[in-house]
Amino acid sequence: MERMPAWADALLVPLISLAVAFAISSGVILAIGENPWEALKIMVTGALGSSYGWGYTLYYATNFIFTGLAVAVAFHASLFNIGGEGQATLGGLGVALACLFVPWPHWSLALIGAAAMGAAFGAAWAAVPAWLQARRGSHIVITTIMFNFIAASLLNYVLVNVLRPTGSMDPATARFPGATSLPGIGDMLTAVGIPFAKTTPANVTLFIALGACFLVWALIWRTRLGYEIRAFGKSEKAAVYAGISPVRITMLAMLISGALAGLMAINNVMGEAERLVLNSVEGAGFIGIAVALMGRSHPFGVLLAALLFGFLYQGGAELALWTSIPRELITVIQALVILFTGALDNMVRQPVEALFLRARKGAK
Amino acid sequence: MAERQAQGRPEAAALPPAIELRGISKAFGPVQANGDISVRVARGTIHGIVGENGAGKSTLMSILYGFYRADAGEILIGGRPTPIPDSQSAIRAGIGMVFQHFKLVPNFTVLENVVLGAEEGALLRPSLARARRELTRLAEDYELDVDPDALVEDLSVGHQQRVEILKALYRQADILILDEPTGVLTPAEADHLFRILKGLKAQGKTIVLITHKLREIMEITDEVSVMRRGEMVATVRTEATSPEALAELMVGRKVLLRVDKAPAAPGRTVLEIEDLRVRDGHGVERLKGVSLTLRAGEILGIAGVAGNGQSELLELLGGIAQGTGRVRLNGTELDLSGRGCNGRARRAAGIAHVPEDRQHLGMILDFAAWENVAFGYQDAPEYRAGRFFMDNDALRAECEGKMARFDVRPPLPALAGKNFSGGNQQKLIVAREIERNPDLLLIGQPTRGVDIGAIEFIHKQIVALRDAGKAILLVSVELDEIMSLSDRIAVMFDGRIMGLRDPARTDERELGLMMAGMDGTRGAA
Amino acid sequence: MMDLPTLLQILDSTIRLGTPLLLACLAGLFSERAGIFDIGLEGKMLAAAFLSAAVAFVTGSVWLGLVAGIVASLLMSAIHGLASITFRGNQLISGVAINFLASGLTVLLGQYWFALGGRTPSLEGAARFAPITLPFAEELRGVPVLGPVYRELISGHTALVYVALLAVPASWWLLYRTRFGLRLRAVGENPAAVDTAGVSVVGIRYAAVAICGLLTGLAGAYLACSLSAGFVKEMTAGRGYIALAALIFAKWRPWQALGATMLFGLLEAVANRYQSLNLWGLPLPVQFMQALPYILTVIILAGFVGKAIPPRAGGQPYVKER
């Protein structure tokens, strides 16, 4: 009955898809007259060859872990949340409000408060499309896209007209108070005797992201809610048979998804920029889609994929610095990863399945 | 009646048959849907094909319409070998098909639906104009009047069916195949359809009627072929047979599965059902006022051909579908249409449900066996660890226990549901539901697609539950299963209960007649 | 109150800004009416904008640029068709991938060819679409109201504006008056009906996706070679999504698409001209105007004002079943 073994489904197919995506990317690099091997070397050196590079790689990866987990949780309920970008934008607003208007005595308390606000704002932004899907049948993909744009306009308005300090021309909030400044990875590692560059944006949020991976894993595979989310995602009809309410699961899955996307803001807004600027999310919400697809919606897979994309982002920046290859190469790779691990999954899967079937017949 | 049958086969013998199938075989994986089928359908006749569910009727006709390709065999149309690899070829060969589920575009007009795929040129206007003239003519000739400008979604089911027939006639079909055409019609609509079919026959068209309703066969066909388990067991002239003989051919003389069971000792009333009604998504009433009572320690078997309301009855009682009427379980009224109408509430009330569609409702195929053990009971205290978590260790242990007690093979709790055979999937589900010790067990098609050994085992479990004083509502399309398990039998036809029978005082022939919508003759239970 | 010249200016830029939305919206209409969801309009337009500008600059001919732009978006359409029709993949994921692919490739190739940070050089002369002065525009200038309206508003646009406006009745005619249109609409509602009628579902769907590519190609070329003078990174700026919103707003119908895109064009024109509006004492920030198309679409989608029902078979790959 089984077409191919579980390991092939979980590892082989994504790896082949990834290989195809990278092969085509190499072709693109060749086509613009550069050497893919040299490019890879620059990327590896730039992203992983120094603690400075690692700092940036981990900073980016932290963002992508949050947005990847957000997309993954929704995927488990068979919901496609393209709204990570908007939810993270709103999360940024929540974090900024928490940092600006509450006199936090210590960064650790500020972190808890800001995280709660970021998650709440992200969840609230996901709640409307979720409710419209659950109760009115409005397609969640379209509504979350619309909410991305509405979020961008809202933030623009708030930054220009409300939160911009008087006299400033910059559409951004004031700098957050010093007490909300999060310790960087460099400081933390140096304190325990490991030398690490101090000027990188990687910060304590990384550990929260790792914790989020674990919590999402526990949620999906250990809790009753996770059980119901997975059952609903596999078959709505069967879920109804089992007494699982589609409305409840749609709402909860999207609220969790939005909260995770919103949590990203403690990394980029609180940890790095220390103020809220326009377009602070920088597409991380969309990269979450690639990360979740590649990670097969498993938190561990998401972690690995986020690290890969963190590496690509930092490596891509280095590449743009040292060669004439622009950063947008990463966008192309990201597109190809989404295309082959997502939309063209059958193109890779069918031949692999056929191969296994033939091998099995041969063995008989 | 005699007169009509006398003219039933005109000069057909002289001409080659309209359709001749030679040795058609078709398998889906390990299932042989059609095995070496040969049949001739004479020109200008109405030819019935009867058989139980899964006998292979629809598969055979789908092969004839180019929807499936036969593995072996030959199709002759009008005496000429005609390969039919796709629907286009079937249409060219003069074959039209009216599917059980209509293939219409709901927001198109009747005219547009008729023209679709049979347009005359790149522009629509001339095609539509021609179709309008043609429709007027067909309406006059065959009582096929439908408003050509009405949207199909606004039409009644009976009118939608006429559009399907018009589509075929517009494509100048000489051969018309109708798959269970009266399943969705009211009696008046069905009568109208028969008049149309008779009119078509009078014009020399050949009609193949697939049905399970013997009344229709007797009323309208000239010849009838009987299919059983993928084979063609007989083709006879309708006037030379009787409903009783056909019922016997359909059901066959099966070896009765012996179930050792003591006489029932029914106790207090567990379930009281009054006037249950359910409408489907199209507004068609599928359950038309069903009333039943069920007592502790008894198995009530519901016999019937699939699609006569049994599924709706199970789904309403199981909290999956909504409807109207009254249901009391142990004296407490159940919510049939509000927020309390869901699987969770039903389980809390003491109802367990082994659904008919075990692969799409009863379990999550991608879930491991141990996860499926909790399916529907994810809230149960013994499967929980604290408020939020599930006790996966307890579930695995529970699964192992169930696998041992119900002989599920292979006994591997970590194996995904889809990797078990049908019988072992069913044992797992039956174990899950029976071991909850419910007051009422709903069980649909308990042994469909299940191997012989597992059938016996599952039957024993059902009887054991009865002997423990529980009430069991059994739905099955397998008559022998109903006969051997039930303490009382209710026959459903067209959304209604045709009658109740005592299994000791009835036989398959009588039940078969009732299932086909004809009144049984012997005393009620 | 505003005077006639101001009003004419705003309406004139409404048409200019509405045109790419209209072309993209009609493109989406063909695709989605055939049951293929397309959130990749943005990417196809972007790819077309880039390649049309690049080729127009290199050859000096805007018409060769136009052809190149169409080729670019047809290639993107081919990927979408392969993923969603042949390999029955997720149409939404495919659309997302196409948007990123275009976003990345345009800058990558732009930088390689022109080394201007992803821009193309400015287009001049024959490398841009020239405005067309309609007959009698000068002669009629003296006629009160009608004269200026004809001269300023109706005359003086580039060819693609008129093509876009003509595409509306043409699309309507193709969809509702031809055999192809009947089959295309049927395939988006109930592909099984088309299949059992002996017509290829796959063929019709590929044709629809190709028309979508053609129209997004026009939209992209218009953006780069008419509205602007050359390609700039991310120059579509969400127009593909606004077109998608307009499509829902128009409930997948051509004439309504004209209305919806021109309404959204007007919103953009007004937002460009005024930093804030005061409507009957209610201050409307410019950001609200920018967000309005999306807000309106959500309201329509929610079904509170005239429910938008998408084609029934939309988003689902066709699998034959009895």
Image: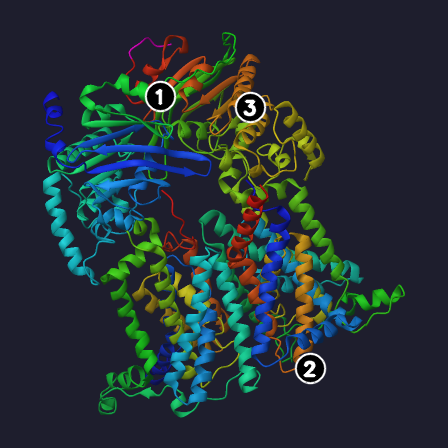
The chain identifier of the residue carrying mark 3 reads: B
Q: Are marks 1 and 2 in contact (CB under 8 Å)?
A: no
Rate crowding at label 1 as few (under 14), some (14 to 19) or many (20 or more) other CA atoms within 10 Å: many
Which numbered dot is residue A76?
none
A229 relative to C85, above or below: above
- Most extreme residue toward the right is A193
Q: Are marks 2 and 3 in contact (CB under 8 Å)?
A: no
Q: Main secondary structure of the magenta part?
A: loop
The one of C256 and C68 positioned closer to us in this rendering: C68
Horizontal and vertical percent position of residue A258? 60, 56
Judged from the image, the secondary structure of the residue bearing numbered disc 2 is helix
**Range shown magenta:** B521-525
Q: How far is disc 1 from disc 3 in space, using C-alphas?
A: 36 Å
Which quarter shows the C terminus of chain B?
A: top left
The residue where tag 3 is placed is B350
Horizontal and vertical percent position of residue B38? 29, 33
Between circles 1 and 2, the one closer to the viewer is 1
The residue where tag 2 is placed is A322
B195 relative to A110, above or below: above
Which quarter shows the N terminus of chain B?
A: top left
Task: Tell me what residue is drawn at x 47 percent, y 84 percent.
Answer: C54
Residue C294 lies in magenta, yes or no? no
The chain identifier of the residue carrying mark 2 reads: A
The one of C314 and A199 positioned closer to us in this rendering: C314
